Image (cartoon, grey):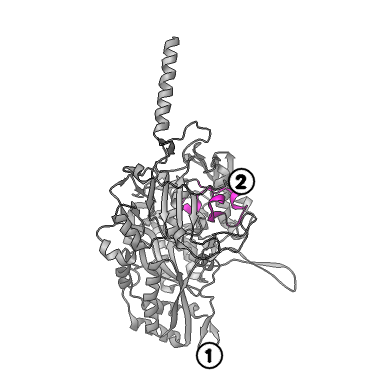
Amino acid sequence: MTKRIIALLLSIICVALCFVGCHDKNIDGEVIQGAEIKMYLSDMVYDLDPALCLDNDAAMQVCGLLYDTLFSLDSDGKVQKSIVDSYEIKKDEQRQEYTMLITLKDDNCWSDGTYVSAEDVIYSWKRILDQDFNSTAACLLYDIKNAKEAKQGDCSIDDVGIYAVDELVIQVTFVGDIDYDNFILNLTSVALAPLREDVVKKLADWSKKPATTVCSGPFMLRRVHYGLNSEGREDLSMAELILERNPYYRRAKDAKYIDTSVTPFRLIVDFSKTAEEQLDMFNNGEIFYVGNIALSKRAEYADKAKVTDLLSTHTYFLNENADIETKDGKTAKLFANKDVRLALSAAIDRNAIAEKVVFARAASALVPYGVFEAGNRKELFRDKGGDIISTSKDMSKAQSYLASAGITPSDYTFKISVRADNEVHVAVAETVCESWKELGFNVSVETVKPIVNPDPYLGEDAKDIYDDEINSRYYNNNYEVIAVDMQSYSPDAFSTLAPFAKLYSGQSIFKEMNEETHEWTYTLRGHKTGYDSETYNALIAKVDAASDKNERASLLHDAEKALLEDMPVIPVVFNQNAYLISADLSRVKSSYYGFRVFTSAKLKNYLDYIVTEAPETVEEPSA
């Protein structure tokens, strides 16, 4: 018996040693923890808050790797459990109470080893539903009891029907017998990913530096440098992004050995090279993935790249409250005029823009390809809804709209604001600008750069922390016309269309004190653009109340048509993601939302590409 026990122990030790060996290799005294994959993942991203990443496709590419969601969508659009272990729907018809118990897996950990808890999920959702927080993703949660009322300031955030039963179990109480499959579909959105209250509340810029960012996804932010030297001057030779394996991903924090849930050790993005140089490096075998092909090279790579539709429409937001400069030195609310908005849309040659962008489709409506029809992933909303707006330029129609509005275009001057470091956005804006100049408007393209963050960072002056100025203008409604990658928060058209209705806008409540009575007044804000249509508001409310899937889908099509008859925003192209992947890089998967999943990626002969200099050590965030 003793010999058998000894033999068993020896076997266990051998297996354990083999297990450890699968992860680490010891070469010349240096422990190699896995592949370090050089790539060009996306453009620079300056804020990695998952609740604020959905107006920029580049941010989505990164945030999708850093944050885990309750459920996920595979490349075919099938819902998969992610951090959820199980869920149970309970219906009490007599009391008219409808609940869902969601149990999280017990091996979900943050990158600092803390368990992902039910409270993390609840905090993230309540943050979005808080009346002081701007988020058009709020409508994803409006099936929850008192969620809409809390967002509108009609009840306390504590009255929202989400509670932690224990550390890993969430009880969700609904407004009625809802479409539970659709609610689960909403929970695939990265906007609803769990967040740590102790981290988010500690520092306003928590999502901009490795030391204050904790991640629940397969990777964590190891290093980010935007090209600012110690003297505060631009030096792009230093610019880089390094994502590193989250050692606690899918691993109980008290486990003895690191498991195999994440294969690569690092993803390394060198921003010091231009997009063209990145392509040369890819062709020379120096990098293994290109997630953003240089605009000047797209035609050349049109047949070589892998292309997927993004649930995203490149869209121009027109601020109806903006004071547009007039010829006589005064201002006017130019974009509050429906006919002006329709004229600007009619003047755009979407076909020509799509051809220039290469990896895009001319936008024939607002809701992009990939969105489901009536919850059916095999039928698309766009195919069913067809074309609503023309993809060709029609200057005579545009001029007719202006005549109806009584507008002389040469009397008005305004700007199109775009991200300076996004060459595609700039190229599109320049094309649109020429069309609007042809109409007679005095219009220019304003390329907006990120600005150095002026606030102290952990008690010291900020170093290499940038604020995304375009994001700031977008969320604070400080623009005339602004270019936005308008992403669908879920494959349900409601998530795209509902925020244009006042009760579903998700905007923070405007608070103002009456100077005479010294009392506060609270005003519900409408859509970011200032659009507020009683007809459209009623239509979206009708969609929300519909219980039949097909009736609801039909109403959503009616809503899209009604919205584009008013044109508060102008769809330009349906975005696509085109990428190049080396034959040496395998097992890379895709999310239905259009970002790559590198969790199980394998690089052939990875020991040949190990980076000798490790990135600087960062502090773990403290509670």
The mark that comes first in sequence, 2 or 1, is: 1
Asked if one can make out residue 465 in the rendered structure from this viewpoint, the answer is yes
Which residue lies at the image location 62% right of the left edge and 54% below the top edge? 458
Location of mark 2 (residue): 622
Q: Is residue 212 left or right of residue 282?
A: right
Residue 446: x and y in percent read: 46, 75
Q: Nearer the viewer, residue 331 or 30?
A: 30
Membership of 196 in magenta stretch: yes
Question: Farthest residue in the right direction?
Answer: 517
Tell me what residue is drawn at x 51 percent, y 52 percent. Answer: 143
Check the image and report above or below for 111 versus 50.
Answer: above
Vertical comparison of 405 with 136: above or below: below
Comparing labels 2 and 1, the label whose residue is closer to the camera: 2
Nearer to me, 383 or 619: 619
Magenta stretch holds residue 33: no
Q: Which amino acid does label 1 sit on?
A: Asp
Q: What stretch is highlighted in magenta?
A: 186-215
Q: Position of residue 85 (x, y in %)?
A: 47, 38
Tell which of 474 and 225 is nearer to you. 225
What separation in Å lies between label 2 and label 1 (alpha carbons)?
57 Å
Instruction: Give, as a three-letter code, the residue at label 2.
Output: Ser
Q: Which residue lies furthest to the left in this view?
A: 303
Q: Position of residue 391 (x, y in %)?
A: 32, 72
Label 1 crowd (10 A; few <14 / some 14-19 / many >=20): few
Residue 188 at least partly seen: no
Q: How many marks?
A: 2
Q: Residue 328 carries which label?
A: 1
Q: In which quadrant is the N terminus drawn?
A: top left
Residue 374 is drawn in which quadrant? bottom left
Q: In this view, does 468 lie to the left or right of 601?
A: right
Residue most extreme to the bottom: 328
Q: Quadrant of residue 21?
A: top left
